[in-house]
Amino acid sequence: MHEMSLCEGVLLILEDNAGKQGYRRVKTVWLEIGNLSGVEVEAMRFGFDVVTNGTLAEGANLEIIEVPGEAWCMQCSKTVPVTQRFDACPDCGSYQLQVTAGDEMKIKELEVE
Ligand SMILES: [Zn+2]
């Protein structure tokens, strides 16, 4: 499962930051997941619980913030909403779109102690 390795990546960041910022426990993780990233929210929740078991983030809340997809349409010269990576522009039907938001996953905020 793809999400399992993503969760391991998140945990590595948490452990790395713990050393730098001097916290010992992670209580809440706010994770931004773009609608175009292909990441399954439910699989992330499941993977997070499994991966953090026995770590500094054991039992931490995982708050998922879903980020809507956006792309720049070269024909319209404006930002348009997209629901899939290779969508056409909803206004003009062009496929000359450059995705500008919603295609990544990142840690937005942490609650630690
Ligand atoms: Zn357009």
Image (cartoon, rainbow, N blue to C red):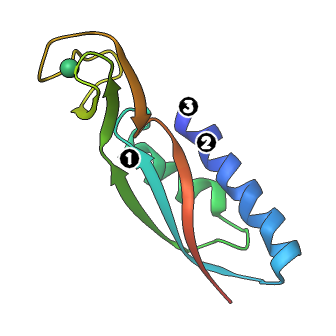
Label placed on residue 2 = 3
Distance between mark 3 and mark 2 Cα atoms: 7 Å
Q: Position of residue 98 (x, y in %)?
A: 41, 23
Identified by mark 3, the residue type is His
Vertical comparison of 95 with 51: above or below = above
Q: Position of residue 26 (x, y in %)?
A: 64, 77
**Front residue of this view, candidates 18 and 89:** 89
Instruction: Kindly identify which residue carries mark 1.
Output: 41
Instruction: Kindly identify which residue carries mark 2.
Output: 6
As drawn, the residue found furthest toward the right would be 19
Q: Position of residue 42 (x, y in %)?
A: 36, 47
Camera sees residue 27: yes
Within the displayed image, which quadrant is ligand 1 positioned in? top left
Q: Position of residue 37 (x, y in %)?
A: 44, 34
**Which image quadrant: the N terminus?**
top right
Label 1 SS: helix
Number of residues whose C-alpha sits closer than 10 Å to that of mark 1, classed few (under 14), some (14–19) or many (20 or more): some
Residue at coordinates 81% horizontally, 79% vertically from top-left? 21
